[in-house]
């Protein structure tokens, strides 16, 4: 049986069955762990685009990354620092290679032939749902194993961690230690979990299937013939509508994922915390897709900064190194979202925005004017910051939604109407 997650009756019937069965064994952690894995495998096999062959590939990659982490975690094995680095790098590159193959059409064309991509540039010949998210979980496991910070690695917990169905399709990107601790512990919060999980599901359904759908007809469209007739006001309003649609749709999905997991007795990390009410773009990103942002900071930004801050030039210019690391991190974020050049521009846009903010904040601290210092601490400054931040984010969505060809169509249309 195949069904869509969160939007079909068979999904909710299946979820109820899983909750009942898993909760019957709240006091038997070993049985509960097996039930979580079996239910997750059955649920992801019910996803319309997920095939048994996809499951085989997922299991192979999971075992590959687990074994890499297992040997890195062992006190008696891989004691040589050089060998440890070599093995962990091989693990990361193996997962990244798998991600790149399924994510980028031009790589698939190299291996599977170019006929499909020639007919539709940028298209993918094969596709695996969830690959962006479970790949990042695997990389997290390998890196933390290299650092010897994985507690009690278990193949059962790891397979469940990778395939856990509420977060499989679109996150959040949780961390292994927290998940394994919950799956192996005795559960005693049945009533609070059911109440809080149910409330979260109601919030998610309202955001995703009411608020997001109300906004959908007004979002910036990707049809070239419609874009060609847009003026600046229509374009801006379309981006505003898309920003709120994007938020309600994604935050609604996250609420549903967190709520379903909570019914089973698993707490997933929060992904959104009122991002459109933040004073600057750094705060917005700290509260938007929080699990992805923290992953990018932990595994891209900080390794870059730590690797190069010992060099003389960067030691003398730490702000430049921090800004460079942030720009590279957000370019990687853009590439993770898609292979088109507009995603790279979108990532650079936000990375440069945060870099400019960093320089501004450093200069702001040097201001001695009592009047300006009072303004910086006032609610007016906060309101202006929130307004500017939202506009920066919303207008930047043009780079996220439209490829370069459609961006040119929209730009010509807007300029011609001025």
Image: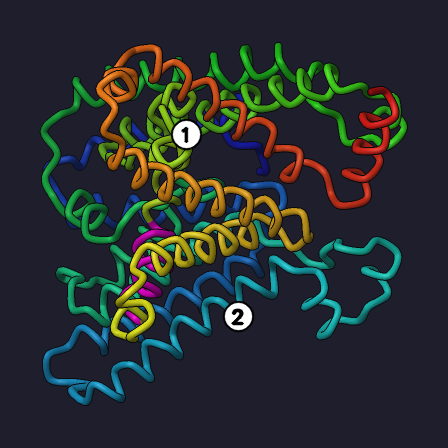
State the CA–CA distance, disc 2 to disc 1.
Answer: 27 Å
Can residue 257 be seen from the camera position used here?
A: no
In the image, residue 398 lies at what x, y percent? 66, 33
Q: Secondary structure at mark 1?
A: helix
* The magenta stretch spans residue 298: yes
Earlier residue among tags 2 and 1: 2
x then y, percent, for residue 104: 65, 60
Q: Nearer the viewer, residue 281 or 303?
A: 281
SS of the residue at dot 2? helix
Residue annotated with mark 2: 97
Q: Position of residue 123 (x, y in %)?
A: 75, 54
Residue at the image point whose x is 20% and y is 45% from the top: 183
Q: Which residues are magenta?
A: 295-307
Is residue 335 depicted above or below 258 in this figure? below
Instruction: Out of 49 and 241, give the one closest to the viewer.
Output: 241
Residue at x-position 56% and y-position 48%: 337
Q: Residues within 10 Å of mark 1 (few under 14, many from 20)?
A: many
Mark carried by residue 254: 1
Residue in view at x 36 percent, y 60 percent? 321
Q: Residue furthest front?
A: 369
At 31% from the left edge and 51% from the top edge, which residue is drawn? 161
**Horizontal relation, residue 67 to residue 351: left or right:** left
| Secondary structure predominantly adopted by residues drawn in magenta | helix
Q: Position of residue 191 (x, y in %)?
A: 17, 18
Vertical position of residue 364 compared to residue 73: above or below = above
Q: Is residue 220 above or below residue 356?
A: above
Which of the 4 quarters of the picture holds residue 4? top right
Give the quadrant of residue 221. top right
């Amino acid at each position: 049986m195949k069904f869509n997650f969160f939007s079909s009756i068979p999904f909710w019937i299946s979820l109820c069955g899983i909750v009942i069965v898993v909760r019957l064994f709240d006091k038997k952690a070993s049985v509960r762990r097996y039930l979580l894995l079996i239910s997750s495998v059955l649920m992801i096999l019910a996803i319309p685009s997920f095939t048994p062959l996809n499951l085989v590939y997922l299991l192979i990659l999971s075992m590959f990354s687990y074994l890499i982490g297992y040997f890195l975690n062992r006190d008696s094995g891989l004691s040589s620092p050089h060998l440890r680095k070599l093995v962990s790098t091989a693990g990361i590159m193996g997962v990244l290679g798998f991600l790149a193959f399924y994510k980028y059409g031009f790589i698939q064309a190299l291996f599977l032939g170019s006929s499909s991509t020639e007919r539709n540039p940028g298209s993918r010949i094969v596709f695996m749902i969830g690959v962006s998210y479970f790949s990042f979980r695997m990389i997290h496991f390998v890196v933390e194993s290299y650092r010897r910070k994985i507690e009690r690695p278990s193949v059962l917990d790891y397979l469940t961690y990778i395939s856990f169905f509420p977060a499989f399709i679109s996150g959040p990107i949780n961390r292994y230690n927290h998940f394994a601790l919950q799956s192996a512990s005795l559960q005693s919060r049945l009533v609070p979990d059911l109440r809080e999980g149910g409330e979260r599901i109601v919030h998610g359904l309202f955001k995703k299937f009411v608020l997001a759908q109300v906004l959908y007809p007004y979002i910036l469209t990707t049809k070239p013939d419609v874009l060609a007739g847009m003026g600046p006001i229509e374009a801006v309003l379309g981006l505003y509508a898309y920003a709120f649609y994007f938020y309600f749709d994604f935050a609604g999905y996250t609420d549903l994922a967190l709520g379903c997991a909570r019914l089973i007795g698993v707490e997933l990390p929060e992904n959104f915390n009122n991002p459109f009410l933040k004073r600057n773009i750094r705060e917005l990103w700290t509260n938007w897709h929080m699990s992805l942002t923290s992953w990018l900071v932990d595994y891209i930004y900080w390794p870059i900064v730590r690797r190069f801050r010992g060099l003389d030039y960067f030691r003398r210019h730490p702000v430049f190194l921090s800004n460079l690391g942030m720009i590279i991190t957000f370019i990687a974020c853009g590439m993770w979202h898609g292979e088109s050049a507009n995603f790279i521009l979108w990532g650079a846009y936000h990375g440069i925005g945060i870099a400019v903010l960093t320089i501004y904040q450093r200069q702001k601290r040097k201001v001695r004017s009592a009047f300006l210092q009072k303004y910086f601490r006032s609610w007016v400054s906060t309101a202006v910051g929130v307004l500017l931040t939202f506009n920066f984010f919303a207008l930047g969505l043009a780079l996220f939604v439209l490829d370069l060809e459609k961006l040119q169509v929209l730009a010509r249309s807007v300029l011609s109407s001025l």
